[in-house]
Amino acid sequence: MAITALPPDTDADIARVTEALAMITPRWNVRILLALSGPPVRYSELAAKVSWLQNGQLHPKLKSLCAAGLVERTEHTARHVTYCHTERGVALLPVLPMIVTWAEDHLETADRPLPAIEQIEDSLTLLTRRHAAAILWVLKSRGEVSGRALARIVMPSSDWTNVYPPLRQLVADGLVDTEGIGRPYRLSAAGDGLSPVLGTLSAWSAGQPLSQAGQHPVWGHPQAKPAPRPWVSSQSRPAPTTLPRGRGESSPAWHNRDLFSHATTARPKAVIPAGGPRR
């Protein structure tokens, strides 16, 4: 069933990215995924890695990640059960450092240096606001849009004034700009800077190699050639057999352990303008 008045392919694309975000945004999910990096581990070994979680908290989290297709549970014997990433889970991991890069460039400066894992969690909170994905898609593809026009596109079956609470939230978060009441809305620099993250999430959720993110019809690079087939279809998404990597593309220079500590970089930090995305 359509969730917006956008074309079916775009509507399905937004729904899939929203679903992908919903898999990883719940508290502790990203930390559990990172703790599972490496060979399969037993429940007790995983629990030791995420010791801040009580036993009653870890089990339902693992169950939901297994149901989402990101974690695999293997029962060797009644007393020997291991957990590890699925291929889909492995393919999702390269999105995380992209989120860190965006957060370092665009989120407001915190009072203390933040571990990269907290940068990811703060960013995911902004991206999973209600109707956020659909609003960002429309503004990216159409430029400036009035609130009434946005409402007709994003929530066609609701009263058009219902678009303003999520719009105000996105403005407060620093992802959307407007010059005032009655004026059109547009992406801020931070909202536009989400292109690599959302394009890659779209590729992953559609079962495409992550290298195809640059060809996304909305979030891709302008110079990229059109994709040879529709970006989204109504077919079930296949799981990639290996971690997608473009030809000649080297492994990412980050390691999972780096996400738990504040990473220092040699590049100078840009000044975050007032009114930038909030944490």
Image (cartoon, rainbow, N blue to C red):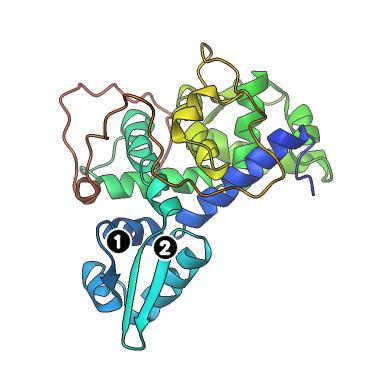
Residue at the top extreme of this rendering: 223
Q: What percent of the width, then of the height, locates residue 98?
A: 36, 35
Q: Residue at x 37, y 23 (%)?
A: 273
Q: CA distance from mark 2 to mark 1?
A: 9 Å
The amino acid pointed to by label 1 is Leu
Instruction: Answer whether labels 2 and 1 touch (C-beta < 8 Å).
Output: yes
Using the rendered image of the protein, determine whether residue 267 is visible from the camera's viewpoint.
Answer: yes
Left or right: 53 in relation to 198: left
Identify whether 218 is placed above or below 11: above
User: Mark 2 — residue?
Assistant: 71
Using the rendered image of the protein, determine whether residue 197 is visible from the camera's viewpoint.
Answer: no
- Element under disc 2: strand
Q: What percent of the width, then of the height, locates residue 7?
A: 77, 32
- Element under disc 1: loop
Q: Residue at x 51, y 11 (%)?
A: 223
Q: What percent of the width, then of the height, locates residue 258?
A: 20, 46
Identify whether 198 is placed above or below 123: above
Left or right: 44 in relation to 199: left
User: Mark 1 — residue?
Assistant: 36
Between residues 279 and 211, which one lies in front from this camera angle? 211
Mark 2 crowd level (few <14, some 14–19, many ≥20, 10 Å Cα): many
Between residues 51 and 177, which one lies in front from this camera angle? 51
Residue 108: name its quadrant: top left
The amino acid pointed to by label 2 is Val
